[in-house]
Structures are given as C-alpha cells and as structure tokens.
Amino acid sequence: MRVLIAGAGLCGLTTALALLQRGYDVRVFEQATALREVGAGVQFGANGTRVLIALGLEAAMRRVVCEPTGKEIRLWTTGQTWPVFDLGVGSQQRYGAPYWMAHRGDFHAVLLDAVRAAAPDAVRAGMACTGFEQTGDAVTLHLANGAQVTGDVLLAADGVHSAIRRQMFGEGRARFTGIMAWRGLVPMQVLPPHMRQLVGTNWLGHGGHVVTYPLRRGALLNFVGVVERDDWQVESWTEAGTREECMRDLARWHEDVQAIIRNIDTPFKWALLGRDPLPHFAQGRVCLLGDAAHPTLPFLAQGANMALEDAVVVVRCLDAFPVQDALRRFEAARLDRTAAIVRGSAENTRRFHNPALGDPAGAADYIDREFAAEKVRQRYDWLYEYDALTVGL
C-alpha cells in the first residue's frame, strides 16, 4: 500500500515511522525547505511515551529529554507552592510509562533520523500540499510546484492551517480567545539555585498563568507566559517580541517569574485561537491527523500526545481493514477522546485564570480545593491511562 503524508512535523513523521516499520511504501511532503522544529518545549505523558517506546525510540529520546520528578502549582503573587503529583517513579508505577519533557527541535530530529534510517528518501522538503482529488481506488495529492502524486491513502498532518482540512471541511471558524502567550528558553545555570529543580511548575494567577519546565536533561528551562490581552491576534510561533514587553505583561508576578524573563534571549509571542471539534476526520481515502484534525489550546499539555496516539491508531486500522473502512474506524476510535481533550484544555483556562486567585485571602483556599488529589486524578488519569497500542478499533 502506498501512503501519502502531508506534513513532516511531529505527527507526520511519527505516522511515517510507524508505517515504515510495518512495511508500507511511504512518501512525506513538507512545505518547509529546512526540516526543523522551532525552539519550544513539549510534554509527553505516559500515553505518549508508551507510544515512543513501542516505536523503538526510548534510547534516542532519553539522550535528549528531561524526566521530571514532579509537577507543582505556585501562586503568582507569593510563590507559595503545592505539589500536584509525582511524575518520576509515580508515573511509571501508576501508568506504566514515564513522563518526559523535551525540546521540540530535539524530538523532531529524533523522529527524522529514525524515518531516514528506515527509508532515506521518504521525506520530501520544499513541497507544499495544496489539495487532492480521489476516486474509489486511489487519491492524488496536488503540490504547489504543480506536481501530482498518487497513492492508496492520504494522511493529512499539515497542521493547524491545513490546506487538506480546508478542502474537506471549509475554512471553519477560529475564535480568538482573548489570550496570548509568550514563550522562551533560558539556560538553567543562569537561574538561582532554588529554580533549577527538575519539576514542571504551573504558576496560577488572576488573568493569566505561567508554565515552566526543564528540557535537555535539565540544561534549559522552558517558559510559557499566558496573559489575557486582545491586541495581538497573530497565530504564529515565530513572531519575536521583546523582554520589555513580556515584563510589562507580567509585571505584577513573583520575582522568580521576573528572573526567568530577564534571562530570555528573545521571547516569542502568539495568539491563542479556539476551534470547535470537527464532526469528522475522514472522507473516502483521505484522513486528517494531529493538529489538522483536532487543534487544541495547550492547557492540558496533550497536543503532541494526541498526535502520537493518532499515528499508532491509524496504522493499526490500516493494518486490519481496507482503506476506507480503516479510516472510518480510526475516526470512530478518535473523535470522542480528542474532542474531550480540546474541551478540557479550554476549561483549564478558567481554572488557571480564576478571579479567586486575585484575592490573597481566598487564593490558597481556591488552589487547595481545585487541586485536591481526587480532583487531579479525575482530570488526568483518563489522559495518561489511555493506550493507543491496544484501544479497541
């Protein structure tokens, strides 16, 4: 079977690798001329790491990831700290797989190396996908350079601005959430000693939140500062801002947050847009995967994990059923879960930015209540327990 994949990002490459390992003829078409990912962090829960381990990537990933000891909540004004859960030994014991934090570029390089080792010519750069046409027994992918490529199935992993999704379902409606995010990287060694712990931290505040976590075996700290602000609506990860502007947005936050911002070389900013879950992913021999299928706000740290799950589930379906039936079964297996993650991520905006956090007297009570152990388990166990390798099709 010849499989065409639109997009050589995290989802497209993971899908390509899983297919190549099962003996498929795979061609991946990527619009960028340079195959690399932008510098930002990505988190892998147990639902994601068990996929990477099953694909034979554990050794390569362990050379670049950070395995945190835990995740904590801190209050934006006082810095008061609450442990949320153990992500080290606890993740392995509770969910059967580790929790990893990685630089997107490092992860992308691991995937690209593995795909090229399996099929050196599988990935074609500088080839933007513009659309498709299909018949009952084949699908033809149209490229921006005028070329056409025909295969048995087209998997569209071409991201949040997917041209394939646009042809299938129209432009859709993206709503600006009223929130923008800052991101940046800081060498861990320049920070005060108490800030060099291998933990993921979620600072909660009135009208915003800040997420930090270690990358590259603890050499870097990833920073994301989310603020309610309506004058920046560009949905891009590559728009540079300034430290001064970032500092103004988070001027009232704890000194530890200020110390991180002062040490960011170039902070980048992007607007967060919300989209309703799609009712379908597949049409005939064409199927959407990853961000093309279910773009989400990042507030459950599940975007990359959903992509990994998609990759494994769609390959299992193609292995077991004829193409069109396989894609229908993939859609049925993935629609409810991915929609629940999209909705849950949006709900966390209200939880992380709650007005109760603006009242010093009530903030601690709010965190004690919202992040009690039982509530945390309800919100996260179903994410990490999911096993894309065995889920029913």
Image (cartoon, rainbow, N blue to C red):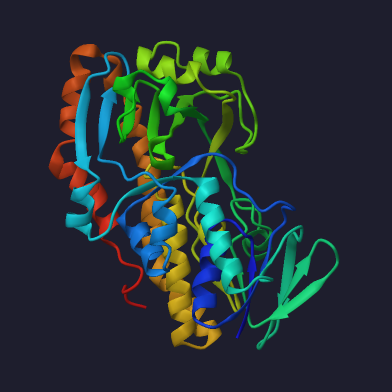
Indicate the position of residue 235 as horizontal and vertical percent values.
61, 38
Dividing the picture into quadrants, the one containing residue 392 is bottom left
Indicate the position of residue 228 as horizontal and vertical percent values.
47, 24
* Residue 391 position (above or below residue 378): below
Dividing the picture into quadrants, the one containing residue 154 is bottom right
| Residue at x-position 25% and y-position 56% | 382
| Residue at x-position 76% and y-position 76% | 149
Nearer-the-camera pick, 392 or 275: 392
Nearer-the-camera pick, 13 or 375: 13
Indicate the position of residue 285 as horizontal and vertical percent values.
61, 79
| Residue at x-position 38% and y-position 60% | 58
* Residue 339 position (above or below residue 354): below
Dividing the picture into quadrants, the one containing residue 16 is bottom right
Q: Residue pushed farthest right? A: 146
361 lies left or right of 295: left
* Residue 327 position (above or below residue 226): below
53 lies left or right of 112: left
Q: Quadrant of the N terminus?
A: bottom right
Q: Can residue 336 be spotted in the picture?
A: no
68 lies left or right of 7: left
